Amino acid sequence: MMAIRELKVCLLGDTGVGKSSIVCRFVQDHFDHNISPTIGASFMTKTVPCGNELHKFLIWDTAGQERFHSLAPMYYRGSAAAVIVYDITKQDSFYTLKKWVKELKEHGPENIVMAIAGNKCDLSDIREVPLKDAKEYAESIGAIVVETSAKNAINIEELFQGISRQIPPLDPHENGNNGIIKVEKPTTQASRRCC
Amino acid sequence: MADTLPSEFDVIVIGTGLPESITAAACSRSGRRVLHVDSRSYYGGNWASFSFSGLLSWLKEYQENSDIVSDSPVWQDQILENEEAIALSRKDKTIQHVEVFCYASQDLNEDVEEAGALQKNHALVTSANSTEASDSAFLPTEDESLSTMSCEMLTEQTPSSDPENALEVNGAEVTGEKENHCDDKTCVPSTSAEDMSENVPIAEDTTEQPKKNIITYSQIIKEGRRFNIDLVSKLLYSRGLLIDLLIKSNVSRYAEFKNITRILAFREGQVEQVPCSRADVFNSKQLTMVEKRMLMKFLTFCMEYEKYPDEYKGYEEITFYEYLKTQKLTPNLQYIVLHSIAMTSETTSSTMDGLKATKNFLHCLGRYGNTPFLFPLYGQGELPQCFCRMCAVFGGIYCLRHSVQCLVVDKESRKCKAIIDQFGQRIISEHFLVEDSYFSENMCSRVQYRQISRAVLITDRSVLKTDSDQQISILTVPAEEPGTFAVRVIELCSSTMTCMKGTYLVHLTCTSSKTAREDLEPVVQKLFIPYTEMEIENEQVEKPRILWALYFNMRDSSDISRSCYSDLPSNVYVCSGPDCGLGNDNAVKQAETLFQEICPNEDFCPPPPNPEDIVLDGDGLQPETSESSAIPEANSETFEESTNLGNLEESSE
């Protein structure tokens, strides 16, 4: 039985770059053309094997709070990784990506794994952001970078595999939860048992 | 982002404090279109928590509050013939008597190093050391502190493209090294032994080596983001309304908590631990065998006091304090029950109130740990944010830094119909919920507000040392003179994610009788000593040393009823700021009442569908719908049955 590690991943990026679509593709292998701004689903999970561990990604969506620049600091708390998304067909979304990185550095945890996703790479004929620019920027901040298409399922798995590989191995000294209490109903398995 | 706001909502909420945020979440959950705005740049209003630099800029804001120049478009032109306006206040007058004292040493070396850039720093040192400073006590401004920070980064660090990364190394140890590093580089001769000792690398902040645990002001600045300093100091009763609501609504999954590990008492100049659970009582070394039996017997009675009316009949009219004297309890035990368990005072509680409080305390024991209280990791300020997230998840729209100029009232119907925001945009809505600090004073002029006195200290050790340096403690210091109030002291350790390693964050709270400093300084002096005095006396001082202290008064509007406001339209609801109490019941009750007015007969924050259920159960059906606004309601019905509320004891440690 492999150990399951829960990893919180937060999504960042401008409204409309495809944050939710990426998660939807990753978690449900599904793409919806008429996706509305994120409502109702605050996070999704997916478990993938990584070495001799299982990584259970708890992927938090912005819930639209980024729209008027009002993301709450609690959104970043305890994140192991952040996926910062821009739209390769919109130069503006790449400029603001840098603002999101800054925001993350100010409010996010230390040692957070940053992954930049240049989404909508299926539309490369109307591309505005060269891959080279993204690569240079990613290198300068020590982030992973990959161009993705949630629509055509390109590089979505790879994006998360890349994150998995960057997650430092479990520190044996940090076993257990240090007395941290989750005030919650029992998780899926437990609640399943009772109904 | 040139996004513009929609122009129509069902509910507009102004202010992001806890009661507003809960109400917003509840309304959004019930399908209302919610716009939630705050003129501030942060969530929580007076319920917020700040990093150290965030707190300094908050302080600065209050200093500069006096002259806000409005460059917003004039709204007066927009008011039609049949309308009138209620202008909202642009000044927050809820915080007063702010005083800051810095006792942590401000490195000589650094002063020299930064002399050019930061001349102000010298002024800062002098006024900081003078505890006699008048009301205009020094307030390090954001600019100063930030420039201190950036300047240090530039001068101290080895070339690095990203100063932040260099900061992101764990613990006080590294900071100590940086200090050294700084010394090496700057060639400023360390002049005194004192300086030397300050720059000794700090080993593990274990209890064995407290002497080396020396923290400077610049370290506090550098590690500033590790602080999450609450403006209000509260705890969650483990069976209180807020915990119940967090569980019921599933908002709890956005937060993590720690159990308060100790209840302390202050008697005869000593801090001691109060036994409260059965195991504690039996293990206690302070109590005699006889006392242990007495206490257990009394507490067992209190658990079910309603069943034994004979035990308290005839005592209803007297105070709990007097009542305790009639019980078989030694003075020692009377003190513990009165101040540390019932958390009341000699004069304020009747027998029945005291019994009820004692029962509540005992009832909350053991749900999550050995004391009745929980504290949210990263501070109390997380909680409003959690509810705001829930509101957003169900479609609520969030705008910080967005002020509302006025409410527009229809003259004929006497109902509020719209707001006009800072851009002059008119946004219409059915209901308007306003945090009371947004109302100008003349809306509520006949009222005498109560005040809360607050102090925040950063100290270098715990008020009661034990094997573990990671204790979270609550201590009640009874009032000394008539007319003053008991002081509640909450000491947080670094694992609560509210302060840097090697320090403690201490919150003091009481109902004001004078200014915060006048109210609280006597208690501070009993429990702590300023860092500077230590350098002279040096050894074996057991009291924790204060590195930095802040005092302020916060307005307590919790007892102001709606009727105090003149001429409020019936669809405008008022939320009060934080109250002085320890728990959060007041905020939850207020939110539920307001929700019932806005959405009569609807369920208050029912559990949302479990996202894991969406993913796991909904292969064919869910994908399209899980992102659409139609689904929350649909799902909630499906999943409500499967949610298992209340039986949470399993999840406790």
Image (tube, rainbow, N blue to C red):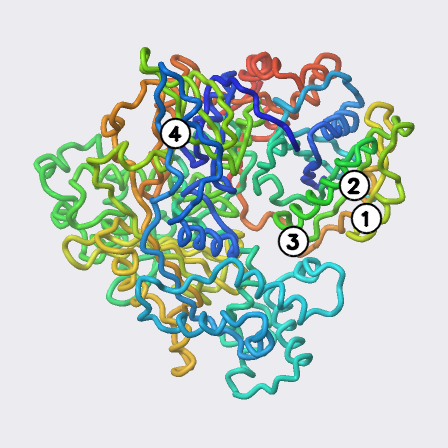
Neighbours of disc 1 within 10 Å: few (<14), some (14-19), many (20+): some
Q: Which label sits on residue A137? A: 1
C-alpha separation, residue under disc 3 versus residue under disc 4: 44 Å
Q: For the residue labelled by badge 2, is the local secondary structure a helix, a strand or a loop?
A: strand
Kindly indicate whether the residues beneath marks 4 and 1 are on one polypeptide chain. Answer: no
Q: Nearer the viewer, residue B359 or A72?
A: A72
* Residue drawn at the location 65% of the way across and 73% of the way down: B177
Q: Earlier in the sequence, mark 2 or mark 1?
A: 2
| Residue identifier under label 2 | A116
Q: Nearer the viewer, residue B221 or B68?
A: B68
* Residue drawn at the location 46% of the way across and 51% of the way down: B58
Assess whether mark 1 and mark 2 are in contact (beta carbons under 8 angstroms): yes
Tell me residue B310's x, y (percent).
13, 34
Residue B250 in sight from this viewpoint: yes
Q: For the residue labelled by badge 3, is the local secondary structure a helix, a strand or a loop?
A: helix
Assess whether mark 4 and mark 2 are in contact (beta carbons under 8 angstroms): no
Image quarter in which the N terminus of chain B is found: top right
